[in-house]
């Protein structure tokens, strides 16, 4: 397998991810509870998450489970679910007798913020004070862990603990690029020239999905390439009205429409899932895949027939990304103390370093503990985004239903049911139906 990842940027030494040394001299971090082997013997902690066993988070969290069971004497009941299933059922599951004790959950106003505002997940201010988790998180990562009484992120109380970072960037088939004489894109014009070259050779340039998230994030990246931080604050934090027919949104929607009509993006994406899109790239059928760092570990293992490259989207300061999905403790957790101990173990240097070595983006690791060149390439890319204060969160965060709303509108755009102007009007209607009430 070819694993020589060509990152287009050099490693940035001082990344805002806050990969800080936090271990003691002997490399062991003791729990503030003082729990030692057997203190909780006979008890069970139910942990829920939606990461694959071969993903960076899955590998690291499996190790955290081992440490937890060794040190506490308790047993972990691991329940695996899917992102989509938990996204749609969390309010009911977390507020029921079948609730897990601790769960991974999506961050943002529409998800964790919504559950925090209605009291379905627990306030963790006391735990942050006890364990010092706030000292391990950069400001941009901590933004997604705090919510107001109305569920708006960025201030208020802590309701979750992110222990990894994530962002979206361009994966590319370096062998196909070389075969067709294409350099790594450094401008949007380069992206379009490369796309035309591939199309002329009978190759659809982009693997994506309009049924699920990749295409929505690609649309948002195009918006961000024409926007600034004030737009992000207006869109995500409701600081000002969003101009849905202004230059940034219009550019993105028209550009996406152009690319579909040109054939750079296939019209079949309306029926494709994110998994389908990922497999198109893995199987070498599409040379470009714009998606998140959560794919990185899997692609390192599954891409076996070509050399894979990674690069940040060109011609932009802002990019989709944030602290990763968070550990939350549901209101119906039967073991909140054990849940806090488990979360703290996932923040330890040993587990954080393993997460980084496995292709993830740790928030509390010592950079000297991470030696793998593939891991270093990913962290280099992420640090470059953070160095320009580029994390701009995700397009579906502003409202509880905007993930489905955005996907549905983009499917309509691809199918020709909406013109770009009509698509923007639909998105404005969905957005304002929720946000106008929040502003009031």
Image (spheres, helix red, strand yellow):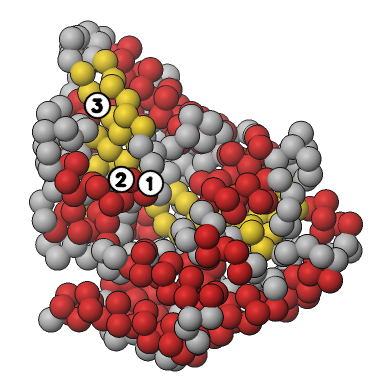
Residue at the image point whose x is 43% and y is 23% from the top: 63
Residue 286 location in percent, x, y? 71, 57
Q: Secondary structure at mark 3?
A: strand
Query: Where, quadrant-wise, is the N terminus in this rendering?
Result: top right
Closer to the camera, 103 or 184?
Answer: 103
Q: Secondary structure at mark 2?
A: helix
Q: Secondary structure at mark 1?
A: helix
Asked if residue 329 lies left or right of residue 219, the reply is left
Give the mark, 3 or 1, whose residue is nearer the N terminus: 3
Compared to residue 312, the image places residue 235 above or below, namely below
Give the mark, 2 or 3, whose residue is nearer the N terminus: 3
Q: Residue at label 2?
A: 86
Residue 399 lies in what quarter of the image?
Answer: bottom left
Mark 3, mark 1: which one is toward the viewer? 1
Residue at the image point whose x is 29% and y is 86% from the top: 241
Asked if residue 57 lies left or right of residue 289, the reply is left
Q: Of the numbered discs in the image, which one, if any, rests on residue 46?
A: 3
Residue at the image point whose x is 24% and y is 42% from the top: 328
Q: Residue at label 1?
A: 83
Structural distance between the alpha carbons of marks 3 and 1: 17 Å
Q: Is residue 205 visible in this depiction of the protein?
A: yes
Residue 132 location in percent, x, y? 26, 40
Tell how many labels. Answer: 3
């Amino acid at each position: 397998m070819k694993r020589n990842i060509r990152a287009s940027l050099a490693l940035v030494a001082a990344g805002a991810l806050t990969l800080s040394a936090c271990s003691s001299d002997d490399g062991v971090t003791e729990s503030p509870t003082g729990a030692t082997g057997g203190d909780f013997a006979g008890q069970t902690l139910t942990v829920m998450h939606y990461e694959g066993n071969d993903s960076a988070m899955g590998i690291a969290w499996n190790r955290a489970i081992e440490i937890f069971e060794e040190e506490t004497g308790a047993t972990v009941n691991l329940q695996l679910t899917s992102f989509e299933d938990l996204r749609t059922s969390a309010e009911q599951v977390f507020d029921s007798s079948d609730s897990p004790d601790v769960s991974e959950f999506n961050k943002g106003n529409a998800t964790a913020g919504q559950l925090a505002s209605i009291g379905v997940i627990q306030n963790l201010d006391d735990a942050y004070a006890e364990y010092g988790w706030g000292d391990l998180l950069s400001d941009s990562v901590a933004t997604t862990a705090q919510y107001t009484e109305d569920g708006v992120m960025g201030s208020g109380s802590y309701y979750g603990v992110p222990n990894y970072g994530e962002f979206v960037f361009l994966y590319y088939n370096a062998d196909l690029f070389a075969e067709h004489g294409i350099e790594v894109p450094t401008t949007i014009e380069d992206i379009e020239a490369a796309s035309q070259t591939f199309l002329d050779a009978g190759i659809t340039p982009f693997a994506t999905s309009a049924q699920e998230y990749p295409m929505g994030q690609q649309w948002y990246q195009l918006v961000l390439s024409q926007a600034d931080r004030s737009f992000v604050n207006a869109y995500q934090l409701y600081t000002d009205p969003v101009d849905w027919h202004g230059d940034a949104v219009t550019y993105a929607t028209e550009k996406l429409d152009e690319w579909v009509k040109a054939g750079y993006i296939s019209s079949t994406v309306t029926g494709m899932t994110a998994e389908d899109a990922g497999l198109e790239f893995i199987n070498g059928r599409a040379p470009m895949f714009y998606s998140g760092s959560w794919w990185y570990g899997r692609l390192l293992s599954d891409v076996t027939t070509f050399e894979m490259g990674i690069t940040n989207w060109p011609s932009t300061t802002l990019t989709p990304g944030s602290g990763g999905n968070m550990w939350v403790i549901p209101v119906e957790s039967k073991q909140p103390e054990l849940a806090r101990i488990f979360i703290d173990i996932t923040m330890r240097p040993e587990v954080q370093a393993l997460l980084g070595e496995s292709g993830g983006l740790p928030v509390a690791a010592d950079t000297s503990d991470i030696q793998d060149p593939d891991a270093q390439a990913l962290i280099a890319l992420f640090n470059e985004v953070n160095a320009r204060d580029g994390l701009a969160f995700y397009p579906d965060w502003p409202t509880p239903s905007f993930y489905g709303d955005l996907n549905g509108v983009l499917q309509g755009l691809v199918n020709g049911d909406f013109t770009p102007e009509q698509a923007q009007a639909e998105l404005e209607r969905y957005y304002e139906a929720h946000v106008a009430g929040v502003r009031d």
